[in-house]
Amino acid sequence: MRTDEKVTQDVTGIQAADIEAVLDPVEADGVYRDSRQCAALALNSGSTSLLLSPPTPRPKKG
Amino acid sequence: MEQSGTSTRLQAAVQDLASGVVSALRGGDHAHVVPPVGTDGEAGDLALAAVRVLGADALLPGLLSRTPPDPAELAVFRKAVEAYPPRADAAPTVRWSHWAMARTLRRADPSSAEPPDEPDTAWLDGATWQFFTHQLAVLAPLALPGEDCAVSRLAAGRPVDVARGFVRAVRRRDWRQAAGAGRWLTLLPGVPDTVGLEAGLDFVELMGGQDPLVTLQVQAARRMRTGARV
């Protein structure tokens, strides 16, 4: 640990690494919405055209 | 992965601070968003670290309403800038976050030192739209009307990618990312109308509004959509 880092830690009690970890987050795993929430969004949108609706199901091959 | 106690307490302090900023953005009291500099002990340490994590947005209400900063608030903000410079091996988002704070400090108090040179944007060269949007969302405090920097210029060149990233974040229920991307979209030229930004932001707040960090970005976006400038 560099001297200036040690001083910072002594002053604040929090390691710079703790802060930098929060400032450089990895992307959270996706949790996809269910159809009821999609419907709520559609109602919310009024007459607006949204890209937020789920994609149209494609016919299965074979 | 289990979070350390320090990390948990830090994140709680950030949430508290963000709640204060949200209240101020909604028109409430903005004089005491940032805790006074005299706060001692662990509470003071955590508060200072929380200001560093929230970054330039800690002073956002005053900037958008063009009210002079409270001297005590400004002192804490300055102390956070000085106490937590980016380490030598810091990630680009950490460097940019610190640069944004230095820029805001200079704007709030012109007698402060000039902000350092902008960090580079090499890490965004050739970034996929997914990664690009995620990084922009992390750097949402840079999204300010009339404030230019290398990151905002890159964002201005990829509005459709950011719009796609916003939609993707909503569909992944990543409300923080969606809110940050939405804030950027309010400022970018060439955003497709079909993205439904207004309704999308409403939905993000509806679904993720229990998290003050989400609400902060949504409120910031709304203020900027109504023409607030820094």
Image: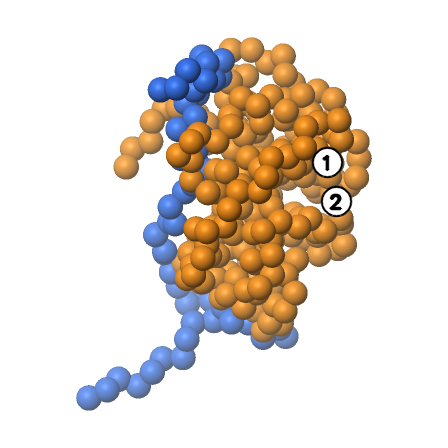
Chain colours: A blue, B orange
Number of on-image labels: 2
Q: Give percent across and percent down for residue B142.
A: 60, 46
Tell me: B103 left or right of A24: right
Work out whether residue B42 can be spotted: no
**Disc number for residue B86:** none
Q: Chain of mark 1?
A: B
Q: Residue type at mark 1?
A: Arg
Q: Which residue in the structure is indicated by mark 1? A: B107
- Along the horizontal axis of the image, is B109 left or right of B162? right
Q: Which residue is disc 2 drawn over?
A: B230
Q: Residue furthest bottom?
A: A62
CB within 8 Å, label 2 to label 1: yes
The residue closer to the viewer here, B229 or B113, is B113
Front residue of A29 and A48 = A29
* Mark-to-mark CA distance, 2 and 1: 9 Å
**Does B182 appear above or below B189?**
above
Residue name at image x 63 percent, y 24 percent:
B78
Query: Would residue A29 appear left or right of B221 to someone viewing this image?
Result: left
Same subunit under labels 2 and 1? yes
Task: Chain letter for mark 2, please.
Answer: B
Q: Helix, strand, or loop for circle 2?
A: loop
> Compared with residue B17, is residue B119 higher up or lower down, i.e. above or below?
below
